[in-house]
Image: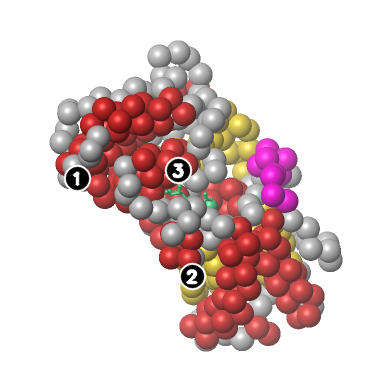
Amino acid sequence: MLVLGIETSCDETGLALYEHGSGLLADALYSQVELHARFGGVVPELASRDHVRKIVPLTREVLARAGRTQDDLDGIAYTAGPGLMGALLVGAAFGRTLAWSLGIPAVGVHHMEAHLLAPLLAEREPPLPFVALLVSGGHTQLVRVDGLGRYELMGESLDDAAGEAFDKAAKMLDLGFPGGPALALAAERGTPGRFRFPRPMTDRPGLDFSFSGLKTHTLTTVKACAPLSDQDRADISLAFEEAVVETILIKCRRAIAAAGIGHLVIAGGVSANRRLRDRLDRDLDAHVHYAPPRLCTDNGAMIAYAGCLRLMAGERAPLEVAIRARWPMTELRPAGLAADAARG
Ligand code: KG4
Ligand code: ZN
C-alpha cells in the first residue's frame, strides 16, 4: 500500500510517501519559520496562505523523487487535528479531494498519534506495550500504549507544554524563534553549576507536570542578571534545560515503574533535544526509542506512516472534510493490531 501523507497543522508543510513493505520512499518539508520569526510566534492566517502555496509543488516533488505518479497512490492521509483550523483545512481539503478524484481511500490522522508512532517508522517490531512521552509545542503527556488507538493517559502538563516553556524561556533570553533549538544551542556554552533551577512537582508522587513556575523562575533570574551578557544567557539556558530534562527523567522513571513496562518511546519536537535523549539513554532503566531529529518535529512522514497503519486496519474518512482544532488522543478508537500492521 502506497500512502501520501500531508501535514499542515501548524507552520510546516510536510509531504511524504510511505509504502507498506518498503518504508519511507520520499519526504519533503517546507518550514515557514522565517515568515513568522519577526512576529515572535506563528500567525495563523499567514500559515494557512503559505500552506496553499506549497502543498501542490511539494506533492509533485515527493512523487517525482520516488519515481511514482499520483495514479500509483493507494491512499491519502492528512492531519485532521489538533492544530490551527485554517492550516488544517488546507491539508484536509486538498487530501480529501485528491483522494476522491483518484477514487482511493483517505484517512484523517491525529497529529499526536502520528508523533507517537514516528519513532517506530524504522523499527521492524514495535515494542508493544510501551510508555510514550509526548513532548511538543502544545503537549506534554505520558501515555500507556497497548496498540494502535489503545492509549491510556498516565500524566500530563497542568499548564505549559515542555516545548512552550522552551519557547518562552528563549524569548525572555532574546535567543530568537523557534526557541527550543536556540536555547539548546546556547546551553552548550553554559557554565555548569552557576544556577540551579527547581524541578517542579517532583517532590510529591504523581505523573503530572507543571512548567509555569520554571518560567517565572527564569524571568526572576533574567531580571536579577540584567543587562545580560552572552555568558549569562548561556548559563541560564543550561540551568533551564537541565531542570526540564531532569523533571522529565524523574517522571518517566515513575511511569515506567508504575506500568511495569521496559520500553519508553519519546516523540514530539522536544524529543529532538540532545540533552534529553542522552539523560534518558544513560539514566533510565528501560529501552529508549526515538526518531531521527528531522522526524521528531512536524513532518509528512509520520502522517503517511500513521495513515498507512489506519488505512490497513480498514479505517476510511467520510467524504466531508472533517477537522478538529482540539482532539484528545484518548478519544481515538483502537484499529487492528499495531504489532502486525506496523511490520515492514
Ligand atoms: O512537535 P513540534 O514540531 O510541533 C508541535 O506539534 O507542537 O514541536 C515543536 C516544539 C517547539 O516548542 C520547539 O521549540 C521544540 O519543539 N523543540 C525543541 C527542540 N527542537 C524543537 N525543544 C528543545 N530542544 C530542541 N532541540
Ligand atoms: Zn507536532
**Residue 46 image position (x, y, % from top left):** 58, 65
What residue is disc 3 on?
A: 163
Residue at image x 74%, y 68%?
A: 93
Decide: is 100 above or below 114.
below
Describe the colour scheme in one phrase. Answer: secondary structure
- Identify residue type, mark 2: Tyr
Q: Quadrant of residue 105?
A: bottom right
- Residue under numbered circle 1: 230
In the rendered structure, find residue 30 and report the number of the disc placed on it: 2
Nearer the observer, disc 2 or disc 1? 1
Q: Dot 3 lies on which element? A: helix
Query: Is the residue at mark 3 in contact range of ligand 1, meaning its CB lies under 8 Å from it?
Result: yes
- Compared with residue 48, is residue 123 higher up or lower down, i.e. above or below? above
Please identify the quarter of the rendering in which residue 177 is found. Answer: bottom left
Q: In terms of depth relative to the viewer, which is nearer, 105 or 96?
A: 96
* First in residue order: circle 1 vs circle 3: 3
Q: Earlier in the sequence, mark 2 or mark 1?
A: 2
Does residue 126 show up? Answer: no
* 33 to the left or right of 322: left
In the image, which residues are magenta?
Answer: 324-332
Residue 312 is left or right of residue 163, and the answer is right
User: Few, some or many C-alpha atoms within 10 Å of disc 3 (few <14, some 14-19, many ≥20)?
Assistant: many
- Main SS class of the magenta portion in the image: loop
Q: Which mark is residue 8?
A: none
The x and y percentages for residue 23 are 51, 68
Q: Amino acid at mark 1?
A: Asp
Whether residue 313 sits left or right of residue 11 in the image: it is: right
